[in-house]
Image (cartoon, rainbow, N blue to C red):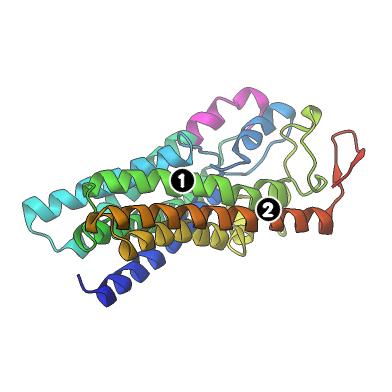
Amino acid sequence: MEPLISMGVLALIGAAATIAGASEDLESDVGSQSNANSQVQLAPQMGYVHRIYNKAIAGEPVSNALMCTIGATGALVLIKHFGFSPLFALVIGSLIAAMVHGSYSVTAIMGREASQARFKQPIYLDLIRSHTPVIMAFAFLTTFSVMIVSYLMVYSLMHPFPFVLLCFLWGVVVGSVGSATGDVHLGAERQFQATEFGAGLNASQSGNIVRKGESGLRNGIDNLWFCSKFGGPMTGVSFGMVVFLGTWILVVFDPAEGNLEGWLSNILGLVIVIVLGIWNWHIEKETREKYGPYKEDKGEEVSA
């Protein structure tokens, strides 16, 4: 493939990956599948009845891997055996994956909250009706974007992995990035606003989530509104960088061209990791100095 065409495909892959990362994080925010999920699940046991959609389908990496694998399998069957166009097949596959994810979401929240009946936690059917379509919509976007990334890598950039396997792997990665990046902007800043910056959560405060919103009781849509300002976009940028930089190295220095190209791609990848690590260290240091000092559970100040 011509270099200019390869770079154009790479740009499209990076854009699709950015959308996948953002939609993945926001999907988990609506359903509280991310960092704060354990505290939401624990809240009724501590006397805090809430209106937060609480699903947590096997964790984000596994959940997204399942979605992307189902979508990729369905799309591949439509392409190979029914002659569907790739774009239409990817849309149908993503729709199937979103429907499966929606059914899992409903059974998850129904099962979890039914098991908490002894703690007076009701099952809010209006919450399920309002949140589940939103969850499915973001699941569709995530699956479709990951499938676009994988399809272009396999059939345009000649990636050696099969399409379905690559969708599975990217599904794991996007879920992991959502947990690593998006979590910070859900739990501490939205559902635990009374917690001191940098403080650990005292055991006696377990389940003490913020339950009152700007209008009425807090729910997952409120979390979505908040996280779409920063947490979702940052997750998108993180996953987009992972996909773009990793693929860019292989486009510029294709290991298939020879041993030297393979070594150059490895060296460049190591340089990128080191640069990002140093950059991250500086950001954390600046944050500690600007917003510190941190607090311990007992309220004692800790040097930044």
Residue furthest to the right in view is 300
* Label 2, residues with CA under 10 Å away: few <14, some 14-19, many ≥20: few
- Closest to the observer: 261 or 92? 261
Q: Where is residue 108 shown, x and y percent of the image?
A: 47, 34
Q: Does residue 260 appear left or right of residue 244 in this picture? A: left
Q: Is residue 241 above or below residue 302?
A: below
Range drawn in magenta: 109-121
Q: Which residue is at a point 49% across and 29% down the rendered structure image? A: 111
Q: Quadrant of the N terminus?
A: bottom left
- Would you say 232 lies left or right of 205 here? left
- Residue 72: where, in percent of width, then height? 25, 49
Q: Which mark is residue 281?
A: 2
- Residue type at tag 1: Gly
Residue 217, visible in the rendered structure: no
Give the label on residue 175, or none: 1
Q: Are marks 2 and 1 in contact (CB under 8 Å)?
A: no
- Find residue 172 and report its image quarter: top left
Mark 1 nearby-residue class (10 Å; few <14, some 14–19, many ≥20): many
Say what secondary structure mark 2 lies in: helix
Q: Is residue 15 left or right of residue 281?
A: left
The x and y percentages for residue 121 are 63, 32
Helix, strand or loop at disc 1?
A: helix
At 74% from the left and 31% from the top, the residue drawn is 206
Quadrant housing residue 40: top right
The mark nearer the N terminus, 2 or 1, is 1
- The count of marks equals 2
Residue 202 percent across, percent down from the top left: 80, 31
Q: Is residue 114 magenta?
A: yes
In the image, farthest residue toward the front? 260
Q: Amino acid at mark 2?
A: Trp
One can see residue 296 in this view: yes
